[in-house]
Amino acid sequence: MSNNLEADYSNYVVYGPDANCTLALCPPELSVYQYRPSLAANVCFLLFFAIAGLIHLVIGLKWRSWFFVVCMSCGCICEIVGYGGRLWLWQNPFSFQGFLMQIICITFAPTWFTAAIYITLSKIIVYLGPQYARFPPKFYYWFFIPCDVLSLVLQAVGGALSSVSEGGSNAAVNVSIAGLSFQVVVIVVFIALTGEYVWRYRKGQRLTPRTTPLSKGFKIFSYFMAISITFILIRCCYRIDELSEGYGGDLIHNEGLFIALEGVMVLVAAYTLIIAHPGPVFAGLDEDQKVQDIQTPHDPEK
């Protein structure tokens, strides 16, 4: 944004609750994002997240997977509200309310999706065999869910602090980056523990194989679960890079990257989690249920 352009509109307030700029008075280059969000892209994201949320709700109610459906529904609702905020910014790029809606909701919406993924790992461990896990099945959600909540709180606080400054608050940016960075660390730890469990399971299966092979449905479920967490990880890394430059950096002013690495990544994760819904795979499985398909418990480390 050129200094001459700012000088030409020095009598207008371009950001904050007292903003008096509109498209009729000021060019979008003076707004926080320095562009007018795409109408087509944001309508598509809003509609596709709404459809994903409805599908998750129907499947969740059918299979009574309450925690999963609550997390996925909350995540999709946050995305819908967030992209509604971006549509508000399309109408008026200087809208303070629209900016608040999208910066807060879109930023922490994926934490709901990761919470749904974390709780599913414990079910996978019960289903395949707790004896192959380094920790008891319940440990995984008692550890990862609080971490997810902390990440959500940090990102929400960062977004709220950013909303009362024109991106000039280093504290706000740092809090947001801390929340996203913590989320990345937690996801990496989750992937590492999941990978270790798979390795221990396969090692144990060479000694004490299952009486029946894993179903094709379970394998598809596992592949799509892995895709979803990978896409969310990519998205988080992008947002850290974006925020590291503050609101004056190049990345935050690049809508194409935002659409590809935020919108598309999270949308694909939401839809892959429809295929990776735990209900059809773990129907009737209680967390304390013993695995009946293992001949003899065996710890591959022994």
Image (cartoon, rainbow, N blue to C red):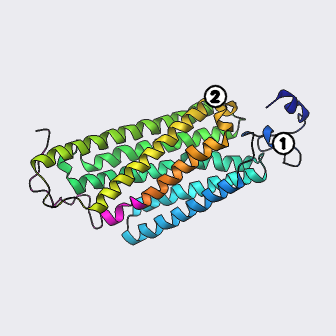
Q: Position of residue 52 (x, y in %)?
A: 52, 62
Indicate which disc residue 170 carries: 2
Q: Which residues are magenta?
A: 275-302
Q: Position of residue 287 (x, y in %)?
A: 26, 58
Q: Which of the 4 image quarters holds residue 191?
A: top left
Q: Is residue 45 above or below residue 181?
A: below
Q: Position of residue 297 (x, y in %)?
A: 11, 51
Q: Is residue 92 above or below residue 179?
A: below
Q: Which residue is farthest bottom?
A: 62
Quick one: label 1 or label 2, which is nearer the N terminus? 1
Front residue of 287/262: it is: 262
Q: Is the C terminus in the top left, top right, bottom left or bottom right quadrant?
A: top left
Magenta stretch secondary structure, dominant: loop
Q: Secondary structure at mark 1?
A: loop
Crowding near the residue tagged with mark 2, few <14, some 14–19, many ≥20 C-alpha atoms within 10 Å: some
Q: Viewed as shown, does residue 244 lie left or right of 282?
A: right
Crowding near the residue tagged with mark 1, few <14, some 14–19, many ≥20 C-alpha atoms within 10 Å: some
Q: Is the N terminus in the top left, top right, bottom left or bottom right quadrant?
A: top right
Q: Is residue 295 above or below residue 149?
A: below
Front residue of 44/129: it is: 44
Front residue of 280/61: it is: 280
At 55% across and 65% down in the image, what residue appears? 51
Type of amino acid at the residue the image marks with label 2: Asn
Is residue 271 a member of the stretch shown in magenta? no
Q: Which residue is mark 1?
A: 27
Q: Position of residue 299 (x, y in %)?
A: 13, 44
Q: Which of the 4 image quarters holds residue 284?
A: bottom left
Number of numbered markers = 2
Q: Secondary structure at mark 2?
A: helix
Type of amino acid at the residue the image marks with label 1: Pro
Q: Is residue 108 above or below residue 292?
A: above
Label 1, label 2: how far apart the Cα atoms are:
26 Å
